[in-house]
Image (spheres, rainbow, N blue to C red):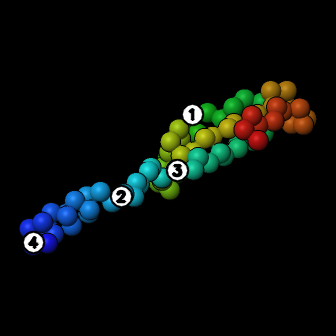
Amino acid sequence: MRRRDFMTLLGSAALALPRPAFGQTVQRIYTIGILWPATLPPGPPRMESLRQSLRQLDFVEGRNVVLELRHPRAGRRSFPSLPPSLSA
């Protein structure tokens, strides 16, 4: 076998070998439950400060964290009647 034929055979064999496929890594989505004791939900400044603190820890709402807010509309005594989480 001539040298040129051998190199062609070796190059063709290298191209024909299967290559590993690298898929996307799965990023976990965390759920943070917030149980607010007042009859009204927390105001925008409180929730925005929570979101800003989470962003500093690389948790961005909608990308890798979900915030679930629950508050009793009828006062603290109605905590047991709050709906359970949908993603349990």
Circle 3: residue type = Gln
Tell us which disc is closer to us: 1 or 4.
4
**Which badge, 3 or 4, comes first in the chain's sequence?**
4
Query: Given the image, on which type of amino acid does mark 2 rest?
Result: Arg
Observer-nearest of 58 and 29: 29
Label 4 sits on residue: 2
Nearest to viewer (mark 2 / mark 3)? 2
Q: Closer to us: mark 3 or mark 4?
A: 4
Disc 2 to disc 3, C-alpha distance? 24 Å
**C-alpha distance separating marks 3 and 4:** 53 Å
Q: Is residue 35 above or below residue 75?
A: below
The mark that comes first in sequence, 4 or 2, is: 4
Q: Amino acid at mark 4?
A: Arg
Q: Are marks 1 and 4 in contact (CB under 8 Å)?
A: no
- CB within 8 Å, label 2 to label 3: no
Q: Residues within 10 Å of mark 1 (few under 14, many from 20)?
A: few
Q: Earlier in the sequence, mark 2 or mark 3?
A: 2
Q: Which residue is mark 3?
A: 27
CA gap, disc 1 to disc 2? Answer: 51 Å
Residue appearing at x 69%, y 31% in the figure: 41
**Residue at 48% in and 52% down:** 25
User: CB under 8 Å between callouts 3 and 4?
Assistant: no
Could you tell which of marks 1 and 2 lies nearer the N-terminus?
Answer: 2
Labels 3 and 1: the sequence-earlier one: 3
Q: For mark 3, does the 10 Å Cα neighbourhood hold few (<14), some (14 to 19), or many (20 or more) residues? A: few
> What's the distance in space between the residues labelled 4 and 2, CA to CA?
29 Å
Name the quadrant of the N terminus. bottom left
Q: Which residue is mark 1?
A: 44
Q: Are marks 3 and 1 in contact (CB under 8 Å)?
A: no
| Residue 76 horizontal/vertical position (percent) | 86, 36
Quarter-of-image position of residue 44: top right
